[in-house]
Image (cartoon, helix red, strand yellow):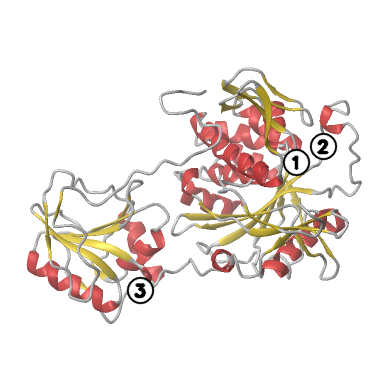
Amino acid sequence: MLPGDELLRRTWPQRLVMLAGLAVIVAALAATWWVQTIYDGLSSIGRVEIPGHILVTDTAPGEPVNFLLLGTDSGAGLDPDDPINIGRVEDPRGHGFADTIAVLRLDPVSRQAWVLPIPRDLVVPVSGSSNQRINAAHLIGGPATLVETVNDFFDIQINHYVRVDFLGFREIVDQIGGVPVWFPNPTKSVATGLDIGVAGCHVLAGADSLRYVRPRKDYSEFIAGEWVVTGNTDFERIQRQQDFLVLALDRAIQRGARDPRTMADLLQAGSQSVVLDGELTLSELRNLGESFSSFNPDNITRFALTVTTQYTDDGVYVGEILVDGADAAAIEVFRGVADAARPSEISFHVVGADLQELSGDADVLHEIGFDVVSQQQITTSVPHSVVIYPPGERASAETVASYLLPVPALAEDTLATRMTLVLGEDHEQILFLFPRGSSDTRAAIDALGEASPPDLGDVAFTTTAAPSTSAPVESDTTTTTPTTSTTVTIMGRPPEGQSCG
């Protein structure tokens, strides 16, 4: 590449955020159980005060919140002879460079989560003045400066702050008995000391896990008789880190992370190396835990920033520059546009046993603005109406429910690719002019409890004509609610037919 040339890049599909993501979700899971041992564990976690005009923490119960998640390069607390500390000078203020940065948005009502990793070398104005790589903001002014930088540059309001360092990462991994990782080839990194001599499954303890997630320039695999560098940028490292956190969360749950005693041990393990903002209350963590206690980490909606790599005229690396406007829609999610779904944005099938009622209701739903893809008569009715929704579409399902009397139950189907409204025997009418408010709808849904998708697999559907202005009917006959099984590829998971851990 010639000096001054720019290379357009998009980060790999993201999974979670490296260190702090584990800390905040572990804390959320922990808060599900209101027991003294967990209270003690949370109480021992470090706190940092960030001014209220920078960190807005007075959110209402159930309101979506944005966490700024930070993993630092601090080796504080590690043995002075630890390889990580070779040549390392600790910042006396405890700031250090930001090694990993991300914004995590949690909506406890719709039980949705979104994550936006921020490249550590992204060039932004720091403290409202000079352009710096964003990882330097924490070193320059600590948590408040980093939060303010993210607020100002992305116009995203941050509500809470979570930080963890190398020691905390190691201790949490060790507490869950290590993390199983599948290596398709022998793998090494001279820079971090990673040395996997044999392909296959390896359970990585805390120290080896850190060696695995840290390589940035020389992550190498032994392929076809020679060592090949397969990870030499921050983008490959981000992918590896995010996928590792999915594996770590799977392991934590497998090892009993939803058991109070186990969770208390996890919290105690990381308490000396995890820092939260001073206004993140135990009550808020408990409420988050209740909402996300059964959350599948694979269902987090992931975004990637589009950046260009910039060099000086002399060929010196400057950093990554955000491509103006390329990620506007993704960033809008963290400003709240995904918190409420409009009928015109929602597409679903309608099924029911009463053909005349089914046809009339489908017409009304279409008039409201919903995209009624098809209406299908079932030969056997169900007692209660239910909205079957795919992962990540809870908010849309709630919008549909707000128009039905009585309110239907909601059922998440991990295989579904489109929502299906099943009209039950209790269905009375569509609230065309005056749907329920969101708070009333959510309260009614919560009172019903999370439902299971009705067993419609053995029922033959006869598709009727969709409303004349609606989308075409997908097929004349079908035997099940339209679903598709999707496979998520996570680096470090074993191939099909193999096990690990």
Of 215 and 340, nearer the camera is 215
For the question of whether residue 388 can be seen, the reply is: yes
2 and 1 marks in contact (CB < 8 Å): yes
What's the residue at 72%, 37% (across, down)?
A: 214
Which dot marks residue 344? 3
For the question of whether residue 36 can be seen, the reply is: no
Q: Measure how far apart labels 2 and 1 are at the Cα level.
A: 7 Å
Looking at the image, which residue sits at the far front? 2
The amino acid sitting under disc 3 is: Ser
The amino acid sitting under disc 2 is: Gly
Quarter of the rendering containing residue 138: bottom right
Which one is earlier in the sequence, the residue at label 2 or at label 3?
2
Which one is in front in this view, the residue at disc 2 or the one at disc 3? 3
Residue 381 placement (x, y as % from top left): 11, 54
Q: Secondary structure at mark 2?
A: loop
What's the residue at 57%, 45% (across, down)?
A: 25
Q: Measure how far apart labels 1 and 3 are at the Cα level.
A: 45 Å
Q: Secondary structure at mark 3?
A: helix
Categorize mark 2 by other alpha carbons within 10 Å: few (<14), some (14-19), many (20+).
many
Q: Which residue lies under the disc numbered 2?
A: 75
Q: Which residue lies under the disc numbered 1?
A: 165
Quarter of the rendering containing residue 245: top right
Q: Measure how far apart labels 2 and 3 are at the Cα level.
A: 51 Å
